[in-house]
Amino acid sequence: MSNLIHPTAVIDPSAKIADSVKIGPYTIIGPQVEIGEHSELFGHVSIERNTKIGAHNKIYPFASLGSAPQHLGYKDEATHLEIGDHNTIREYVTINRGTPKGRQVTKIGNHNYLMSLSHVAHDCTVGDHTIFANYAAVAGFVDVGNHANLGAYAGVHQFVRVGEYSFLGRGAKVYNDILPFMLVTGNPGIPHSLNSVGLKRHGFDDARLRMIKEAFTLIYLRRSTKAEILAGLTELAQKSSDVAVILHMFESSERGIAR
């Protein structure tokens, strides 16, 4: 056994562990698990099965990854969890595999930070550079866009999409799709403004912010019909790729946009 793997770790023979992976005490790694180069499991980590983890990830004690979906129809079928590179997964985080009648896989991208006790349910897709604060949780089939930030105790209903660069405030309860770039608070969670602070931190200049603000005003501050909103967004999208992203979600939303 590698001197990077603690002797108390229990690893299934079918697991594929890169030589540079560090595995702490009392970690359990199940069958058909893959872990990429320079990842580190600090101890007491559980990775159940059919889980692929990329490189340079840090996984803290008592995290549970690749466990069975919390779904009454699940009958122990072979479903999967895929986690990318450079993620930080803190204590007691839980991430479930997909369901056989759903997407069959839960996917986590790259450079994400999941704080203690946060939860990602079955069949979810989480993009890159997201933050899940303590106790933030997303139900099944939720899509979380790149650079989204979920505050502590935020909760997202199943089948909802959370747009890129959006910010869900502490305790926000989200039941409908959140457009990109929004700041959301309350129960039910609704956009109250743009996530201006977050956008500036990510390098959005005044010109980009101005176009996004025009879209926000059209959607939320005027008494416009859906047809009028679509026409206005279509016109703005010709000048702004950011508004084009908003327009795409507005047009394609199945659960409806949080208003």
Image (cartoon, rainbow, N blue to C red):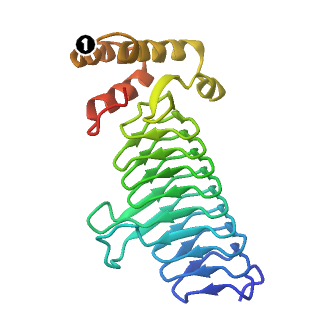
Task: Name the outermost residue toward the front.
Answer: 187
Q: Nearer the viewer, residue 78 or 86?
A: 78
Task: Name the outermost residue toward the left.
Answer: 227
Q: Residues within 10 Å of mark 1 (few under 14, many from 20)?
A: few
Viewport quadrant of the C terminus? top left
| Residue of label 1 | 228
Q: Is residue 198 left or right of residue 2?
A: left
Viewport quadrant of the N terminus? bottom right
Q: Residue at x 68, y 84 (%)?
A: 9
Query: How many numbered discs, if any?
Result: 1
Q: Is residue 216 above or below residue 95?
A: above
Q: Residue at x 53, y 44 (%)?
A: 154
Task: Name the outermost residue toward the right.
Answer: 3
Q: Is residue 185 above or below residue 155?
A: above
Task: Tell me where residue 160 appears, x and y as whole percent.
Answer: 37, 44
Callout 1 amino acid = Glu
Q: Nearer the viewer, residue 148 or 111?
A: 148
Q: Nearer the viewer, residue 238 or 12?
A: 12
Residue 218 lies in quadrant:
top left
Q: Residue at x 48, y 46 (%)?
A: 155
SS at mark 1? Answer: helix
Residue 84 lies in quadrant:
bottom right
Q: Is residue 226 left or right of residue 124?
A: left
Q: Residue at x 55, y 89 (%)?
A: 13
Q: Is residue 82 left or right of residue 160?
A: right
Task: Tell me where residue 2 appears, x and y as whole percent.
Answer: 73, 84
Task: Tell me where residue 72 appears, x and y as whole percent.
Answer: 32, 70
Task: Tell me where residue 152 appears, x and y as whole percent.
Answer: 60, 45
Residue 10 lies in quadrant:
bottom right
